[in-house]
Amino acid sequence: MRGSDPDAALYWLARMLEGGEDPLFIARRLVRMASEDIGAADPLSLLLTTAAKDAYDFLGSPEGELALAQAVVHMASAPKSNAVYMAYKAARRAAKETGSLTPPAHILNAPTKLMKSLGYGDGYAYDHDVEGGVSGQNYFPDGIERRRFYEPKPVGAEAKVRERLEAWGKVRKDGK
């Protein structure tokens, strides 16, 4: 599937099934590949693979194997991007490095006078009230510079995500 060859992907699916591999193990791997290898370039892949797993669960063999085959062909033919996978790994590293920091004070509610006096809610911009619906505020913890983890690729549905994030200034137009 990574090589975008639906015929080879079908062959290997058939080989695994004929060899006695557990179809639900295959379905699990399909779901993982939908998130890791295809990602936001074709977000329907995750829905289709979980539906294929459910269809196999419901129908069993041999009828349910066709649902797995449909997912395999879809994913082999889909645009590929591991940008979400890579971004998540980078965000996890950053979270481990920075520890348990609190959200920035401007996005915290201030239901008490003490919280208000500590600056909770000061300068908060409600995104729905801002032209374009994006305030541009920093949502990282105070004291941490805003970081970019997610760099969407210009393929499939992710190309539209990239355009939107570029317009909002959340991704650089040069891809760096």
Image: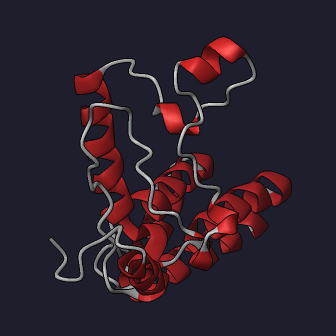
Q: Is residue 140 above or below residue 147?
A: above
Q: Quadrant of the N terminus?
A: bottom left
**Could you tell me residue 86's position as x and y percent?**
28, 54
Q: Quadrant of residue 112?
A: top right
Q: Is residue 83 above or below residue 93?
A: below
Q: Is residue 101 left or right of residue 28?
A: left
Q: Quadrant of residue 49?
A: bottom right
Judge whether residue 95 can be spotted in this image: yes
Q: Quadrant of the C terminus?
A: bottom left
Q: Residue at x 54, y 68 (%)?
A: 134
Q: Residue furthest right?
A: 58
Judge whether residue 77 can be spotted in this image: no
Q: Residue furthest top?
A: 114
Q: Is residue 97 above or below residue 153?
A: above
Q: Is residue 137 left or right of residue 28?
A: left
Q: How many marks?
A: 0
**Could you tell me residue 12's position as x and y percent?**
40, 70
**Could you tell me residue 147's position as x and y percent?**
26, 50
**Could you tell me residue 11's position as x and y percent?**
42, 77
Q: Quadrant of residue 68?
A: bottom right
Q: Residue at x 31, y 53 (%)?
A: 87
In front of the other: 16 or 40: 40
In front of the other: 128 or 21: 128
In front of the other: 16 or 112: 112
- Colouring used for the render: secondary structure
Q: Residue at x 44, y 66 (%)?
A: 39
In front of the other: 137 or 17: 137
